[in-house]
Amino acid sequence: MSDLIDLKPDARVSVRERFGLHSPLTVPAFRERDAHVPEIDAAYRFNHDVTLAILAGFAQDRRVLVQGLHGTGKSTHIEQVAARLNWPCVRVNLDGHVSRLDLVGRDAVVLRDGQQVTEFQPGIVPWALQRPVALVFDEYDAGRPDVMFVIQRVLEREGKFTLMDQNRVLSPHPAFRLFATANTVGLGNLNGLYHGAQRLNHAQIDRWNIVATLNFLPADEEVAIVLARVPALADDAGRSLAHRMVAMADLTRQGFAAGDLSTLMSPRTVITWAENLQIFGDVALAFRLSFGNKCDDAEKPLVAEYFQRCFDLELQAPPVRPGESVPPGPGCARPPPRGG
Ligand SMILES: Nc1ncnc2c1ncn2[C@@H]1O[C@H](COP(=O)(O)OP(=O)(O)OP(=O)(O)O)[C@@H](O)[C@H]1O
Ligand SMILES: [Mg+2]
């Protein structure tokens, strides 16, 4: 892998052409693809507002935090924007055990001319800060709040970074960018879904210039994402099925909001369900294996009722084998489209 230090943005790309968004903006980009640039996922569909927020981060050096429920495409969104700008991007998964030394650096014994010497090895923050790298703190709210103070100054405009053990002050590379993703807005696990999420320091949350929210999308957009991920569903019957799957997911979200269910289906679960359907060929079995079995026993009857409402099918119905006649309506892996 190259050292990156000499790279700088040397092109501009049109947001309309590269991301398919209605926007006259152009943003800086790199001509060359370095090994740190994420792979392009051609099936990725960009959300207008979130993409513009992330692009503002790249173009105008804003610190962008993307917050939202699980499996809505936060982490991949930042990566896919970087991939299309050829911007080197490094994603760091935070957890309660990531320490200050991991982020800042530590002394390590290395071999120099056959001699063992102790040398400072920079951590990910000073390494990225001096390079044209988009550093993404993934699961930012899982990082310990006392440790996260190491980025307090970096979050400020022109934020420098002091390596105390080295008596050195590092200035950020002009193309260094900082992003984060989180399920919560730093208030802790308020809805009970995000065990392990920390309450974050709000002087730090205050330093993020842009907070974009990526929660559940309009049904048509979610169906389009499922069809992009599972092209086998791209015919009329498949599209109708995908609409019912998204409607089912939406019922679980409403059930969760009303306090009837303790879990909900994320867009990731819907995609997994559609993929599992390709393996098992039975929409009820694929549903049970993708989501149904994650539900509490006491809540399963309600989930089965939602399923019945969306598919006109019993969740526990015996599978229909190839060659057997499909009863009208219920029982088919791909129900025919219903009116409306
Ligand atoms: N807009 C989209 N287009 C195509 N695929 C998508 C889109 N959004 C999400 N996905 C797919 O959904 C899955 C989940 O996305 P991702 O891991 O980015 O979610 P997340 O919001 O970071 O979740 P978590 O909060 O659990 O970390 C991925 O496989 C991703 O490719
Ligand atoms: Mg993520």
Image: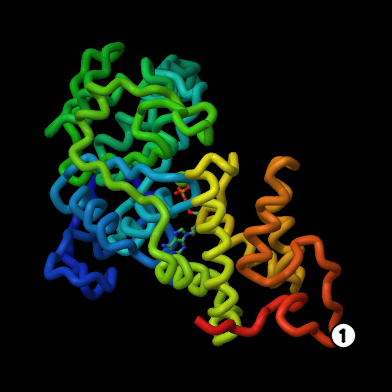
**At 67% from the left edge and 51% from the top edge, which residue is drawn?**
302
x and y, in percent, of residue 315 in the image: 75, 62
Question: Image check: 194 left or right of 7?
Answer: right
**At 45% from the left edge and 72% from the top edge, which residue is drawn?**
224
x and y, in percent, of residue 42 in the image: 43, 71
* Rendered image coloring scheme: rainbow
**At 23% from the left edge and 52% from the top edge, which residue is drawn?**
53
**At 39% from the left edge and 22% from the top edge, which residue is drawn?**
199
* Residue at disc 1, secondary structure: loop
Q: Quadrant of residue 336?
A: bottom right
Vertical arrangement, residue 209 with respect to residue 113, above or below: below
Question: Image check: 162 left or right of 90?
Answer: left
Q: Nearer the viewer, residue 194 or 155?
A: 194
Q: Amino acid at mark 1?
A: Glu
Q: Nearer the viewer, residue 328 or 67?
A: 328
Q: Quadrant of residue 166?
A: top left
Question: Image check: 289 left or right of 67?
Answer: right
Q: Residues within 10 Å of mark 1 (few under 14, many from 20)?
A: few
x and y, in percent, of residue 68 in the image: 39, 45
In the rendered image, which residue does mark 1 sit on? 324
x and y, in percent, of residue 126 in the image: 30, 29
Q: Nearer the viewer, residue 24 or 177?
A: 24
